[in-house]
Amino acid sequence: MKLSDRLQAIEPDQTPSSPGNGQVGETIPSSDPLAEFKGMAKQALYGKLESQAFGSALGEGELKATVIKELERLIADTDIPLSAAERERIAEEISEDILGYGPIQRFLDDREVTEIMVNSTNPIFVERAGKISRTTSRFSSEEHLRQVIERIVASVGRRVDEASPMVDARLPDGSRVNAIIPPLAVDGPALTIRKFAADPYGVDDLIHFKTMTRPMATLLAACVEGKLNILISGGTGSGKTTLLNVMSSFVPANERIVTIEDSVELQLLQEHVVRLESRPANIEGKGLVTIRDLVRNSLRMRPDRIVVGEVRGAEALDMLQAMNTGHEGSMSTLHANSPRDALSRLETMVLMAGLDIPVSAVREYISSALSVIIQLSRMSDGTRRITQVSEIVGMEGEVITMQDVFRFHQTGVDDEGKVIGGIIPTGIRPQFAEQLSRAGLKLPAGLFGGPTAKEKAA
C-alpha cells in the first residue's frame, strides 16, 4: 500500500509561501517529493510516538531506535527512492523534533536567534539582531504545541491547564519562557521564548554592541563596588536582565549575594551566590511563595547584596526597606520608559503594599534608598543602548530631583537604518562621586566630560 493511501486521512504538511508576499499563513503546494514525504512521515510518526515521547520515561536511544524502525516501515511503502544519507537525515530531524521541542528546536540551537514567538499553528516568528522575521516552520497541530509547552513547564515544577492557563517558566539554559493557552488565548496556544546566550555576556560584549561605552562601564563598575543602590529601567526586550547580569559581575567575590526572581535567569559567576525563585500556588490554591515573601526571607540570610530580578508589585516596599536598613549595593530592574516614569511606577508599587503612607513619605523613602537609575532603550535599528544614567539628588518640596550624568545623543539614521549617535557625559559631576572617593574608588579625570563634550561627539 502506498504511503499516500496510508496517510490520506492526515492533512499534508504545507510549505509556507515566501515572506515577501505579505500574506501570513498563506500556503503553496510543495513540488519536492522528498519534502512532501518528510512532512507526511512526520505527521504519521507524531501520531504514533508523541504519547511515548511526552508521557513516559522512554530513553533517547530507545526513542530514536523506535523512530528509525517506524520510518523504515513508511519508506518501504513509498515509491520515492531514498539514499542511506537521506534516510539518516530524515530520521535525525524527526527524532530531534520529538526528543527536543519540535519545530522550535532548530531556533533554540541557532545562536543568532534571540527570541522565538509561536502563535498556535501559524508560521513561527523569530528575532535576530533586534529584528523580527517570519520563518517557514510551524507546529503541525495545537495538540503538538500543547505537549511541548507542558513538557517545558513540567521540567521546572509548574503546570499549565484550563485552571491555570498562563505560566512563566525557563529552559535548562535559563532562557525565559511564557505560555498562554485557551480559553485566554482565543486562536490557540501561544509560546514566547527569550533566549539567553550560552556564555553570559560580559562588559566587553556590551561595549562591542555599543550598549555602553568604556568610560560608562568604568563608572558603573565603581557604582557597584561602592555599594550604591541601582535601579535598571527600560521597556520590554531592552536588555535589562542582561545589563543586571553584567553589573552583578562587578560585585566583589568575597560578598554574599542573594538573587530573587520569578523565574531564574541571572547567571552570576561568583561562588557565594544563593538563588531564590518564587513559586505559584498548586492546583488546590496552596503553596504560593511570592517575590515579596522571598525578599523578606532574604533579610535573614545575612546578604551583602540583594539582587531582585524585577520588581512588579508590593515587593518594592520591602526592597526599599532593605536598601534603607543596611543592605547597600542592592540592584533590581523595572519596566518604565524613562527614569522619571520609573520613579512614578516605583511609587505606585509601594502604595500597592496596602499601608497608609502619605505620598510625600513614599517619595522621601525612595529618594533616600536609590542612588542611580540606568535607562535602557531598544532603538529603531534593533540595538539596545543605555540612554540615560541619572543620579537621584534628593527632594525639593514633594518632588524627587534627578540629574543626568550620561545621556545618549542621536544625530540621525544612516542609509541602512542604523542609528547614528553615542553616549556622552553631560559635564555634571555627580554627588555620589565623593562617596566613591571616600570608599577608595578613584574615577579617571575627565570621566564626566566638560562643556565641549557634546560638541566633540557631534
Image (cartoon, grey):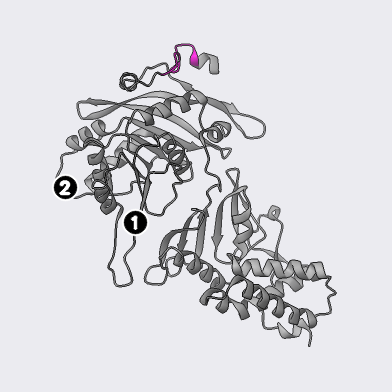
- Depth check: give the residue in front, 396 or 258: 258
* Image quarter of the C terminus: top right
Please state the horizontal and vertical placement of residue 214, each as a whole percent of the image. Answer: 51, 25
Specify start and end residues of the magenta stretch as a single range.
Answer: 443-453
Q: Based on the displayed image, in which of its 4 quarters is residue 254 positioned?
A: top left
Q: In this view, does 52 lie above or below 220?
A: below
Q: Which residue lies furthest to the left in this view?
A: 356
Q: Is residue 385 left or right of residue 45?
A: left
Residue at the spot of label 2:
355
Secondary element under disc 2, as helix, strand or loop, is loop
The answer to whether one can see residue 410 in this image is no
Q: Mark 1 points at which residue?
A: 278
Q: Give neighbour class at mark 1: few <14, some 14-19, many 20+ (Cα, 10 Å).
A: some
Query: Measured along the vertical axis of the image, is residue 396 above or below residue 318?
Result: above
Q: In this view, does 293 lie to the left or right of 377?
A: left
Q: Residue at x 14, y 45 (%)?
A: 356
What label sits on residue 414 in the rendered view? none
Q: Quadrant of the N terminus?
A: bottom right
Q: Position of residue 105 (x, y in %)?
A: 61, 60
Residue 386 visible in the picture: yes
Residue at the location (41% across, 65% down)? Answer: 157
Residue sticking out furthest to the top = 451
**Of labels 2 and 1, the one closer to you:** 1
Q: What residue type is labelled 2?
A: Leu
What percent of the width, then of the height, locates residue 290? Answer: 29, 56
Amino acid beneath label 1: Ser
Query: Where residue 263 sits: x, y (%)?
Result: 41, 54
Q: Measuring 61% from the left and 33% from the top, which residue is drawn there?
A: 418
Above or below, comparing residue 429 to residue 384 in the picture:
above
Distance between mark 2 and mark 1 Cα atoms: 23 Å
